[in-house]
Image (cartoon, rainbow, N blue to C red):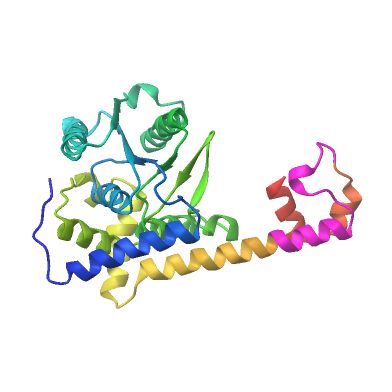
Amino acid sequence: MEMRPPHPDDAAAADAALETARFYIRVNGLLSPGEPVVAAVSGGGDSMALLGILRELGHPVTVAHLDHGTRGGQSAEDAAFVAETCSAWGIPCVLERADVVRQIRRGESFEAAARRIRYAFLQRVAEEREQRVATGHTADDQAETVCMRQRRGAGARGMRGMPATRPLGRARLIRPLLSCRRTLLRAYLRHRGIPWREDPTNADPEYAARNWIRNVLFRDRIEAGGDPVAEYCLLAEESRAIWELSILETARECAAFDVPAPDEAPLSVPRWGLEQMGRHRRRVWWMLW
């Protein structure tokens, strides 16, 4: 468990983290004032900051934690930490354990299986309560995601990164901390005296591609004077604007050539109309169909 002494600058940084999250929630319509919410809490720094900030902003929280049964018993320690924290703070907690290894599908990686099972769990908890579910994704996570997609050759659609909100079954997933830097959130935790746990696998560059980006690629760019988190978050915003413009222009060409909108198109679409559209617009149409 991490509980580091506060730094003299932590007070200002903690206030900045809180106000950044408050503003992001408001401008993206993620939550109404005082709206109850399910929070996905792993026990790590980002999710503990999410829990603290949501409570501080006046949102009644139900914590959802899934023990993946991994890391030689450390995941069970994470679950115990979350349960103890919720008990001490008087917060409802839904805690379950999953044997991810036994549920891996053919051709599926452990990480993909764990993600699938975790989101199915969060969806169920949120739908049962008819509430939104918040995750602790940060600006750093956004930058790492965009970098990974760039290395795979993604276009504007993929380079948009993670959205502030998306459907999750009948519920909705929200990311209130997506504009917050991880350094600000750690300052928030230290200043508020909130403990958290560190997953040692996050520091292993060979464990996952994201770890290599975070601990090797980004670190090298920072040492060279760059700010990869800011750069990739800006790239995500620019890509989102380009993609939305492409959708708008595709809609205009649909109207001009009497082609149905992708979300309204039948299984059979007249070929002539599509062929009159520009190549890029036609590709966007097929992506949305």
Does residue 24 appear in this view?
yes
Quadrant of image for the C terminus: top right
Q: Position of residue 204 (x, y in %)?
A: 23, 49
Whether residue 250 is in magenta: the answer is: yes
> Which region is colored magenta?
247-268
> Which of the 4 quarters of the picture holds residue 57?
bottom left
On screen, residue 133 versus residue 244, left or right, reads: left
Residue occupying the point 22% across, 60% down: 188
Q: Position of residue 6 (x, y in %)?
A: 11, 63
Does residue 67 appear in this view?
no
Depth order, front residue of 259/48: 48
Residue occupying the point 49% across, 61% down: 27
Q: Position of residue 266 (x, y in %)?
A: 82, 38
Residue occupying the point 22% across, 70% down: 12
Vertical comparison of 262 with 171: above or below: below
Quadrant of image for the N terminus: top left
Tell which residue pokes out farthest to the left in this image.
5
Depth order, front residue of 202/34: 34
Tell which residue pokes out farthest to the top in this image.
102
Depth order, front residue of 215/98: 98
Q: What number of labels is visible? A: 0
Tell which residue pokes out farthest to the bottom in this image.
225
Vertical comparison of 91 with 215: above or below: above
Vertical comparison of 221 with 255: above or below: below
Whether residue 138 is in magenta: the answer is: no
Residue occupying the point 37% across, 51% down: 137
Q: Position of residue 153 (x, y in %)?
A: 53, 57
